[in-house]
Amino acid sequence: ALPILEMREISMNKEREKQYISEAFTPKKAAITLRVEFEVATQGNSLVLERSITGKDWVPAQVVTGFGFDGSAVEFGVDGITPGQQLRLVAGAPGKAMYIE
């Protein structure tokens, strides 16, 4: 039988200087798959994953797409997550995000 995966939505409504920042989220497992769907497929759909153990000092963990990316969605895996570590997404355009673990 396949394992039961739990999908969670991530709010991306915090705006800062033309960037859209997600709420912080803390996965329960060491590996997750994230999906971000941008509202419009156009250049500027950049996406960076950031990590923090304090919830204050965020550091880039992975540049998922650059500003030249013009796709409508991106899906990627993240591993090496330590229990309790917080993650967040910083996007160059509005969209919605979700992950499974």
Image (cartoon, rainbow, N blue to C red):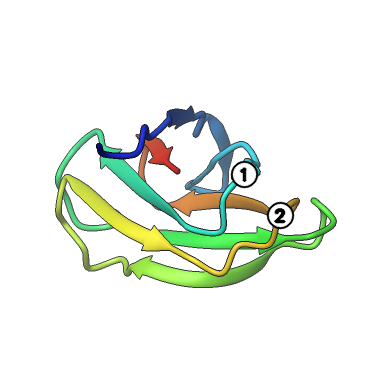
Choose between 60 and 39: the one closer to the eye.
Answer: 60
- In the image as oriented, which residue stretches furthest toward the front? 1
Choose between 98 and 1: the one closer to the eye.
Answer: 1
Q: Position of residue 61 (x, y in %)?
A: 56, 71
Q: Position of residue 60 (x, y in %)?
A: 59, 70
In the displayed structure image, the side of residue 22 where residue 84 appears, left or right: right
Q: Quadrant of the N terminus?
A: top left
The numbered disc on residue 75 is none
Residue 38 versus residue 54 in the image, above or below: above
Query: Disc 2 vs disc 1: Cβ atoms closer than 8 Å?
Result: yes
The numbered disc on residue 83 is 2
Question: Which residue type carries mark 1?
Answer: Lys
Q: Residue at x 61, y 36 (%)?
A: 23
Q: Earlier in the sequence, mark 2 or mark 1?
A: 1
Residue 6 versus residue 101 in the image, above or below: above
In the displayed structure image, the side of residue 84 where residue 38 appears, left or right: left
Label 1 crowding class (10 Å Cα cut-off): few <14, some 14-19, many 20+? few
Say what secondary structure mark 1 lies in.
Answer: loop
CA separation, marks 2 and 1? 6 Å
Question: Which residue type carries mark 2?
Answer: Pro
Say what secondary structure mark 2 lies in.
Answer: loop
In the displayed structure image, the side of residue 8 where residue 66 appears, left or right: left
Q: Position of residue 81 (x, y in %)?
A: 60, 62
Is residue 17 visible from the viewing direction of this image? yes
Is residue 46 visible from the viewing direction of this image? no
Report how many numbered discs are placed on residues in the image: 2
Q: Residue at x 22, y 68 (%)?
A: 68
In the displayed structure image, the side of residue 36 where residue 57 appears, left or right: right
Residue that carries the numbered disc 1 in the rendered image: 28
The quadrant in which residue 78 appears is bottom left
Q: Quadrant of the C terminus?
A: top left
